[in-house]
């Protein structure tokens, strides 16, 4: 029977797959026909309007605020001069503006509303770097899905996310917005997030268009300074920087954003090689490219062009379709056409790409489907969303130290002193890019602990010291770190003496990471280390909970803590999620998505290093690659994260020892939970291409991970597949392909904790 059913199933399945593919092509063709017909009716002014995106003047997310001209917006829309807004939101306001566009402008072309929905809209999820630490694809997708549900119910059609910039420099404040240092992890996060935001159908009322940003290499700025130049080889671009963008594209991302930085002297927003040769011609991207906030205009200070007229010519010829808040295209296009510097065909193509996305979103058929006040009220901050936020937050926490098994803490019968400037902070956990979250709306660590223990334990609290003097902080504020006021120390020391255990909350506030938040010193700021040292003197066990938007340098303080839990900026449910881990209701499972340096002088630091001709040798006399004053290794390596239980790795099996182009290698390993708690392990698979043909290859590269749950005592077989594509790289002959030869396979619990190894070869 089975023998008959299987072919029938395959036939039906194949048929429905083909049907779906055909209907997608048909609907694309139908959209193209509509775009074509509409384009024919449009005047040049109406076309240019589609290329023009303006910000809500009362809510700016970039520099060089423009005149506050909200009143004239209505008129501009009516006259068909604006195609898109950013930072305008809410069902009522977007409906009002959309009504003008659809009902009063000559052709009724709907507006597209974009916004930075980075890690939640009103229900805040952990910052993206933290979510990457979950190594949980489904969790990342779910967080983006919920963000899209809330955003789309609030009038939005488009998010400027995911940020897929790889960064290996923790000084760069925007490292918080991506998935860290690794190529594969960034690819996986990009795919999950694009799927989450866009769902299966962009026209559905609860999905929004995503935007892969910032194309490209924004996270590789010199010395970690935001907006600074990038000097990078084509090899690094292709092997490290591009892959997450390509993964987002393959996952169907609707739009791209060009970045602020120069790449080898050419601004990304005026870079034809990048935006046309690679993105459109090599990769076949069909969506549209938006500039970053006035990144076209910023070519003037970059100095690669002389006038706004040149900027527009360079941007258009490079491949930027929409000008975000730069007002360059709207002023210069006519003259450029008159002077034949650009052609009307180019403009038509740019407009078509934007209109196509508007059609895909269903905006022409249902322009008001995203602005439904009832849905907005029902869905925003929905209790299910908060529940999901808590679940994802606890998966994102990374336990890096747990001496004497101080964690998990008992809920009953103890006295817990909660100390530190971030302990009672219900604002910082929301992070910097916080959508429309209310200030101070997160659950603080202190509240989380209090609610978790109820009356069963005694909770004492002291701030110890302030971290910053600013009573209110926001996106643009310059933070004044407290370096002098120790008046709270005595109280903190006193409560530590009364306690069985001290939970300290140190690190960074929400506005110490994010855009324009680069720091040269990434250790604990202000008086925090001093406070920790004073509490350490009490001899009480200390659990350090770290709030951070970046990997930090903890070398001088880590010995003073018995346990170290990296909490990042974990979102609305922060305190509950952290308490879940502290008291063992959830066994920590996060792993570091970026190395924590031993010293800031090691930065940029990442595990995916090439070997040296003089490899590291601990012998201080030798001529080997090393520092004279510090180790080479980070304090905590990529992929590291402890659990309350232990996992044994054994029985590594490969189904063959050699693969060729169209074959795959099946790998399995058995993981056993040998400890006393149920828990999840992130099993990591790395490879090394042992000898290239002319090119040195990194000593290890992550090529797979699986997060598995194991009850205590349980064993499970974990499977991986390696194909030729996983072995490919940018070869000397400038093709993307693997080279024949031997590969080392490494399976482990962290990049510096490899448990099992084997070898296989690839044959061309
Ligand atoms: C940021 C982008 C953001 C844009 C719009 C810029 O300053 O670099 O990431 O999407 O503003 O808010």
Image (spheres, helix red, strand yellow):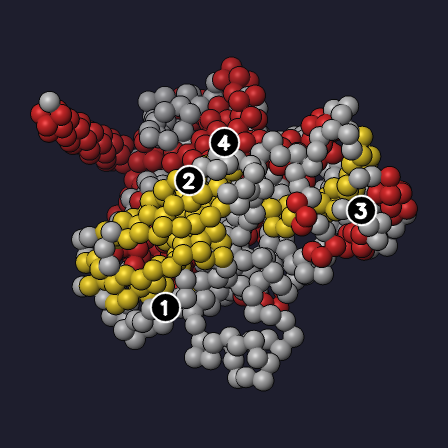
Contact? badges 1 and 4 (CB < 8 Å): no
Q: Earlier in the sequence, mark 3 or mark 1?
A: 3
Instruction: Say whether disc 1 or disc 4 marks the residue closer to the N-terminus.
Output: 4
Which residue occupies the foreground of this view, 650 or 494?
650
- Mark 4 highlights which residue? 147
At mark 3, the secondary structure is: loop
Front position among marks 3 and 1: 3
Residue at point 88%, 50% (across, down): 486
Reading the image, the residue beneath label 1 is 697
Q: CA distance from mark 1 to mark 4?
A: 39 Å
Task: Name the spot of residue 428 as percent of width and height, x first.
Answer: 68, 40
Q: Earlier in the sequence, mark 2 or mark 3?
A: 3
Q: Considering the image in quadrants, where does the C terminus appear?
A: bottom left
Image position, residue 143 (x, y; %): 49, 33
- Residue at the image point whose x is 68% and y is 61% from the top: 555
178 w.r.t. 35: above or below: below
In the visual, does 720 lie left or right of 213? Answer: left
Q: Nearer the viewer, mark 1 or mark 2?
A: 2
Please state which of the two labelled residues, at mark 3 or mark 4, is closer to the viewer: 3
Q: Which of the 4 image quarters holds residue 628?
A: bottom right
Real-space Cα separation, disc 3 to disc 4, in angstroms: 41 Å
Look at mark 3 in the image and give the residue it sits on.
540
Picture quarter containing residue 342?
Answer: bottom left
Q: Which residue is mark 2?
A: 715
> Residue 158 location in percent, x, y?
44, 35
State the CA–CA distance, disc 1 to disc 2: 34 Å
Between the C-alphas of marks 4 and 2, the distance is 36 Å
The residue lying at 28 percent from left, 61 percent from top is 760
Residue 430 quadrant:
top right
Looking at the rendered image, the disc whose residue lies closer to the viewer, 1 or 4, is 1
């Amino acid at each position: 029977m089975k023998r008959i059913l299987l072919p029938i199933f395959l036939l039906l399945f194949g048929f429905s797959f083909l049907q779906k593919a055909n209907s997608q092509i048909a609907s694309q063709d139908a959209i193209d026909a509509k775009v074509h017909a509409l384009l024919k009716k449009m005047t040049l002014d109406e076309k240019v309007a589609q290329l023009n995106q303006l910000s809500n003047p009362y809510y700016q997310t970039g520099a060089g605020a423009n005149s506050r001209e909200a009143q004239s917006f209505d008129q501009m829309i009516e006259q068909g001069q604006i195609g898109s807004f950013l930072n305008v939101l809410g069902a009522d306001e977007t409906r009002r503006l959309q009504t003008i566009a659809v009902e009063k402008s000559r052709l009724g072309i709907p507006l597209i509303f974009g916004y930075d929905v980075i890690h939640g809209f009103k229900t805040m999820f952990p910052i993206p770097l933290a979510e990457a630490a979950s190594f949980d694809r489904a969790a990342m997708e779910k967080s983006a899905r919920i963000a899209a549900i809330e955003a789309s119910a609030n009038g939005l059609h488009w998010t400027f996310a995911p940020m897929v910039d790889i960064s290996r420099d923790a000084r760069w404040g925007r490292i918080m917005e991506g998935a860290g240092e690794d190529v594969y992890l960034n690819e996986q996060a990009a795919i999950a997030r694009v799927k989450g935001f866009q769902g299966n159908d962009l026209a559905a009322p609860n999905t929004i268009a995503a935007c892969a940003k910032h194309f490209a290499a924004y996270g590789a700025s010199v010395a970690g300074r935001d907006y600074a130049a990038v000097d990078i080889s084509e090899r690094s671009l292709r092997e490290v920087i591009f892959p997450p963008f390509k993964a987002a594209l393959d996952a169907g991302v609707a739009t791209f954003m060009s970045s602020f930085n120069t790449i080898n002297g050419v601004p990304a927003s005026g870079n034809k090689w990048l935006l046309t040769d690679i993105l459109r011609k090599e990769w076949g991207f069909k969506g549209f490219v938006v500039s970053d906030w006035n990144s076209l205009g910023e070519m003037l200070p970059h100095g690669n062009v002389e006038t706004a007229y040149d900027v527009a010519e360079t941007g258009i010829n490079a491949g930027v379709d929409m000008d975000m808040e730069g007002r360059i295209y709207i002023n210069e296009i006519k003259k450029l056409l008159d002077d034949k510097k650009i052609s009307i065909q180019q403009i038509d193509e740019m407009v078509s790409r934007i209109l196509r996305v508007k059609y895909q979103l269903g905006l022409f058929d249902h322009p008001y489907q995203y602005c439904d006040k009832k849905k907005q009220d029902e869905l925003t901050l929905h209790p299910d969303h908060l529940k999901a936020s808590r679940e994802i937050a606890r998966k994102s926490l990374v336990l890096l130290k747990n001496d004497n098994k101080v964690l998990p803490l008992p809920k009953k019968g103890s006295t817990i002193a909660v100390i530190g400037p971030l302990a009672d902070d219900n604002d910082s956990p929301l992070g910097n890019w916080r959508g429309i979250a209310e200030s101070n709306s997160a659950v603080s660590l202190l509240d989380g602990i209090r609610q978790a223990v109820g009356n069963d334990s005694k909770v004492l609290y002291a701030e110890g010291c302030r971290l910053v003097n600013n009573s209110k902080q926001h996106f643009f504020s310059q933070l004044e770190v407290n370096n002098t006021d120790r008046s709270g120390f005595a109280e903190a020391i006193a409560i530590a003496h009364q306690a069985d255990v001290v939970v300290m909350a140190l690190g960074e506030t929400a506005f110490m990471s994010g855009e324009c938040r680069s720091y040269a010193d990434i250790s604990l700021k202000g008086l925090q280390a001093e406070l920790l040292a004073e509490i350490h003197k009490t001899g009480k066990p200390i659990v350090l909970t770290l709030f951070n938007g970046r990997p930090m340098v903890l070398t001088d303080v880590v010995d003073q803590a018995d346990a170290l839990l990296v909490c990042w900026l974990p979102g609305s449910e922060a305190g509950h999620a952290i308490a879940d881990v502290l008291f063992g209701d959830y066994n920590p499972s996060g792993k570091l998505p970026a190395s924590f340096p031993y010293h800031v002088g090691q930065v940029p630091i990442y595990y995916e290093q090439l070997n040296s001709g003089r490899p590291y040798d601990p012998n201080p006399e030798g001529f080997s690659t090393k520092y004279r004053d510090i180790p080479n290794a980070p304090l905590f390596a990529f992929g590291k994260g402890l659990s309350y239980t232990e996992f044994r790795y054994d029985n590594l099996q490969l189904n063959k020892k050699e693969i060729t182009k169209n074959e795959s290698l099946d790998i399995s390993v058995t993981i056993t939970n040998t400890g006393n708690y149920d828990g999840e392990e992130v099993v990591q698979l790395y490879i090394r291409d042992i000898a290239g043909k002319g090119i040195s290859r990194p000593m290890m590269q992550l090529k797979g991970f699986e997060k598995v749950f194991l009850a205590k005592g349980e064993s499970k077989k974990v499977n991986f597949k390696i194909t030729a594509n996983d072995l490919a790289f940018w070869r000397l002959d400038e093709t993307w392909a693997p080279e024949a030869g031997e590969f080392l396979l490494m399976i482990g619990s962290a990049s510096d904790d490899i448990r099992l190894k084997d070898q296989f070869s690839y044959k061309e």
